[in-house]
Amino acid sequence: MTRALILDFGGVVTRTLFETHDLTEAALGLPPGSLTWRGPFEPETDTLWQDMQAGKLSERDYYATRTVEVGWMIGQDWTEMAQFVRAARGADPDAVIRPEFRAAIDAAAVSGIRLAILSNELDLFYGADFRDKLPFLERFEVIEDATYSGILKPDPRAYQACLNRLGLPANACVFVDDQQRNVDGAIALGIPTVKFDVADPATGYQTALQMLGVTEELSS
């Protein structure tokens, strides 16, 4: 049976903004330690993250707030997440790609596993031109981005659109996401899932590949 690995983008493919505060501060000319919000790495100190996890606001709302805050810190009136990301990562976006991700898609390719991305805000957050700086995206035959469809995970239509474009049933795929609500949405459709831990990316990718029948150990 043809099989596919379906990945969220965000923290699954790239190191999160929480992990790269030092790079962001350097890119924006901020003193080290200026950015203190740590999301899943220190949820007890990030009340806005706690509210998002409790369903009081969306992930988009969380990052919209952080975008405005960081913009103010450097005298910019930012209203779009892409403005923040371009300023923080635009010079060298390749530097924040997880090595575990690269190893995983290489291993998938060797085993004939097809690749897809299912994102709520790939181009919204990063900007469409960001893709041109990441040539590995050409290896993904499907990129389903709610920036254009307006249908966000965990809406079942988002997952179904990706499955339809792949031409595969739910049980032929494995979906990987770092947000529990999105994982739950995939489970509801019968898609095997991996809840990705941004603090342990190697295990998440290894588990997903094993579920797809790939037994080799990843090397980054």
Image (cartoon, rainbow, N blue to C red):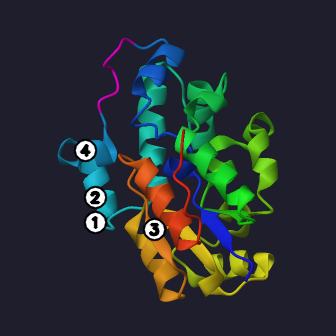
Label 4 and label 2: CA atoms lie apart by 9 Å
Residue highlighted by disc 4: 46
Label 3 and label 1: CA atoms lie apart by 20 Å
Residue highlighted by disc 2: 51
Q: Position of residue 132 (x, y in %)?
A: 81, 38
Reply above or below: 4 against 201. below
Q: Main secondary structure of the magenta part?
A: loop
Residue type at mark 1 is Ala
User: CB under 8 Å between callouts 1 and 2?
Assistant: yes
Dot 4: element: loop
Residue type at mark 3 is Val
Asked if the magenta segment contains residue 33, the reply would be yes
Label 3 and label 2: CA atoms lie apart by 23 Å
Q: Position of residue 7 (x, y in %)?
A: 60, 61
Nearer the camera: disc 3 or disc 2: 3
Reply above or below: 49 against 22. below
- For marks 4 and 2, the one nearer the N-term is 4
Residue highlighted by disc 1: 54
Residue type at mark 4 is Asp
Residue 133 in the figure: left or right of residue 57:
right
In the displayed orientation, state which residue is furthest to the front: 216
Q: Nearer the viewer, residue 1 or 52?
A: 1
Dot 3: element: strand
Quadrant for residue 174, please give it: bottom right
Residue highlighted by disc 3: 194
Q: Residues within 10 Å of mark 2 (few under 14, many from 20)?
A: some
What is the magenta range?
31-36
Nearer the camera: disc 4 or disc 3: 3
- For marks 4 and 3, the one nearer the N-term is 4
Residue 33 in the figure: left or right of residue 9:
left
